[in-house]
Amino acid sequence: MGRRILNRKDLRADYDAAERRKQEDEDETEEEEEGDDEASDEAEESDDEEDGEEAEEEVEEAPKKKKKAPAKVAKPKRTRVAKQVRMKVIWGVFNNSNQCVAKFDYPKRHEAEEHATKLGAAKNPPQTFFIQPIKEAMEEK
């Protein structure tokens, strides 16, 4: 038998509904407790009054449900946009360890190749040098 795939949205909705029911139950118990306190206070006041009917009406009106404030609409968070940095391409002369030995402007590729061959021939035993394009951030004026 295959496993049944769980729908996470349905599970979340069920959980939220259970939380709302739990919150409503707690609110009702708090209101009942507050109503009991108010009823005992009003009962003491009614002993002082001669007319008992008015006190009964007040006791019946005491357990009023509180109106819940409407949920606040969440404002979308403001995201910061990263500044776009202008880049330029240059030629870099690298050794076998991928260390940049020299840098040349993009139109001067021929000079970069000559420099790499000179460095390779100058070392004893000869080493390998190569050129590769590099992107660098342009300096703002």
Image (cartoon, rainbow, N blue to C red):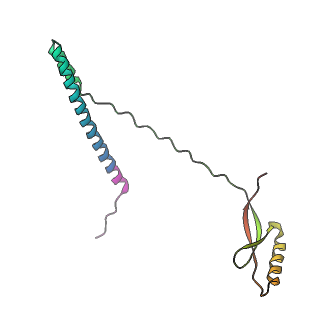
Q: Position of residue 22 (x, y in %)?
A: 28, 44
Residue name at image x 80 percent, y 84 percent: 123
Q: Quadrant of residue 96?
A: bottom right
Q: Residue furthest bottom?
A: 125
In the rendered image of this protein, does residue 28 appear above or below residue 77? Answer: above
Residue displayed at 38% across by 33% down: 69
Residue 103: percent from the left, percent from the top?
79, 69
Q: Quadrant of the N terminus?
A: bottom left
**Which quadrant holds residue 40?**
top left
Residue found 82% across the figure and 83% down from its top: 122
Specify whether 17 is left or right of 119: left
How many numbered badges does the structure rendering display? 0
Vertical position of residue 15 compared to residue 4: above or below: above
Looking at the picture, does residue 48 appear above or below residue 16? above
Q: Is residue 85 above or below residue 73?
A: below
Answer with left or right where residue 1 lies relative to residue 52: right
For residue 83: magenta? no
- The x, y position of residue 67, in whole percent, is 33, 31
Q: Nearer the viewer, residue 102 or 6?
A: 102
Tell which of 76 and 46 is nearer to you: 46
Left or right: where 39 falls relative to 110: left
Q: Position of residue 87 (x, y in %)?
A: 73, 59
Q: Residue furthest top?
A: 50
Span highlighted in magenta in the image? 1-13
Q: Nearer the viewer, residue 28 or 3?
A: 28
Q: Is 50 on the left or on the right of 138, as rendered?
A: left
